[in-house]
Image (spheres, helix red, strand yellow):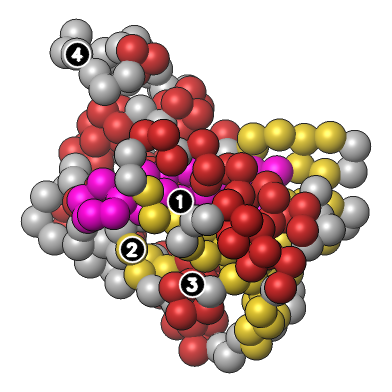
Amino acid sequence: MKRILCSALLVLAGQAQAFDWQDSATVTQVFERAGVTGTFVLHEVGSEQLQGHNRQRAETRYTPASTFKIAHSLIGLATGAVNSVDEVFPYDGQPQYLKAWEQDMGLREAIKVSNVSVYQALARRIGLSRMRNQVSALGYGNGEIGSQVDQFWLQGPLAISAVEQTRFLARLAQDLLPYSPAIQAKVREISLLEQGPGWRLSGKSGWATSSEPGIGWWVGWLERDGKMYSFALNIDTHGPADLPKRVELGKASLRALGLL
């Protein structure tokens, strides 16, 4: 409890910290060429500098959708609602949005295929009271989870901005969240997307459909040449055909900043 309280105070202090914003003309060109409305934010971890495209939108909160699975995994492990990222959640036999979800799986695989039903089952194990306390301790977005423990990150009322996503992920990358280093390391492990000589890219996509247009997310962090960068992108989406643009624009933005 003392660790959570101290970490919560650090979160509040971090949110009050003034970050400088720098518009990136090269990232703006990426969005303009694609004809997409959205934002991209990059934070060099350890600095007080943010750079990117569309500051006003970057500071606007939206439903996190499946990007919350990073925080959700941390909370599940920390509360003991799941013993490990490989503990199997049994498939209940019901038709799922994706065929890939129609099998037994643990969090390691579920986060990769963004299995909503597995994380809803985890949320019900955690329970409303513990979930509310943990989301508050993380300082995650507006901290509001409402009364439906298995819907709040999909339908609201939980909301978070792109800037807040970068701050949350920077703390995870540095072991600064109110959980043991072992838990944070395990969630970083299952969030790894790609790696190569001298670099590692981790993150999570999301698609919030509770509003029109929908909101497509891609958030994460990049380790490169001894430095760490957290980032967050969100864009307007008008259907499944827009979903590939999340990672495409995110990577294009990182390349425009000389990081990929």
Mark 4, mark 1: which one is toward the viewer? 1
State the separation of the CA atoms marked 4 and 1. 25 Å
Q: Position of residue 208 (x, y in %)?
A: 31, 49
Residue 62: mark: 2
State the separation of the CA atoms marked 3 and 2. 10 Å
Residue 58: mark: 3
Q: Which residue is mark 1?
A: 217
Query: Tag 2: residue type?
Result: Tyr
Q: Which residue is mark 4?
A: 95
The first of marks 4 and 2 along the sequence is 2
Which segment is the magenta one? 201-221
Q: Residue at x 77, y 53 (%)?
A: 255
Say whether residue 213 is magenta.
yes
Q: Does residue 183 appear to the left or right of 170 in the view shown?
A: left
Q: Residue at x 43, y 40 (%)?
A: 242
The first of marks 3 and 4 along the sequence is 3
Query: Tag 4: residue type?
Result: Pro
State the separation of the CA atoms marked 3 and 4. 36 Å
Q: Residue at x 48, y 72 (%)?
A: 58
Q: Badge 2 local density, few (<14 within 10 Å), some, or many (20+)?
A: many
Q: Please identify the dominant SS of the magenta region.
A: strand
Q: Position of residue 155 (x, y in %)?
A: 19, 51
- Quick check: can you spot residue 208? no
Q: Residue furthest left?
A: 147
Query: Tag 3: residue type?
Result: Ala
Vertical position of residue 215 compared to residue 163: above or below: above
Q: Secondary structure at mark 1?
A: strand
